[in-house]
Image (cartoon, rainbow, N blue to C red):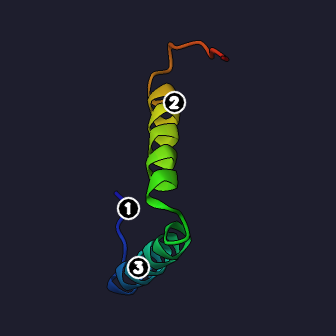
Amino acid sequence: MVALTAAGRELIDRAFTEHMRNERRLLDYLTPQDATQLESLLSGWLAYFETPQRTPTRT
């Protein structure tokens, strides 16, 4: 079994908080329409990679 120490958990919490802050900063530059389009694109991409038996299709 592997577990994080208290210091390790604190480090992960700080890194995750900073990562989320940076992601929000990047997304704040998108218009609402661009954000919707990005969400659609990423959702489709994620669905593809979550289903390993799929074969790539290009349009």
Depicted 35 relative to depicted 19: above or below: above
* Contact check, label 3 and label 2, Cβ < 8 Å: no
Depicted 1 relative to depicted 40: above or below: below
Tell me which amino acid carries mark 2: Phe
Residue at 44% of width from left, 29% of height from top?
A: 47
Depicted 11 relative to depicted 51: above or below: below
The residue at which mark 2 appears reads as 49
Judging depth in this view, the residue of 47 and 58 nearest the camera is 58
Secondary element at tag 3: helix
Secondary element at tag 2: helix
Q: Position of residue 13 (x, y in %)?
A: 37, 79
Tell me which amino acid carries mark 1: Val
The Cα atoms of the two marked residues, 1 and 2, are separated by 27 Å
Judging depth in this view, the residue of 51 and 8 nearest the camera is 51
Secondary element at tag 1: loop
Tell me which amino acid carries mark 3: Thr
Mark toward the start of the polypeptide (3 vs 1): 1
The residue at which mark 3 appears reads as 17
The Cα atoms of the two marked residues, 3 and 2, are separated by 26 Å
Judging depth in this view, the residue of 5 and 11 nearest the camera is 11
The residue at which mark 1 appears reads as 2
Of circles 3 and 1, the one toward us is 3
Residue at 50% of width from left, 26% of height from top?
A: 48
Q: Position of residue 36 (x, y in %)?
A: 43, 48
Depicted 51 relative to depicted 23: above or below: above
- How packed mark 2 is, by other alpha carbons closer than 10 Å (few <14, some 14-19, many 20 or more), is few
Q: Position of residue 46 (x, y in %)?
A: 47, 36
- How packed mark 1 is, by other alpha carbons closer than 10 Å (few <14, some 14-19, many 20 or more), is few
The Cα atoms of the two marked residues, 3 and 1, are separated by 23 Å
Of circles 1 and 2, the one toward us is 2
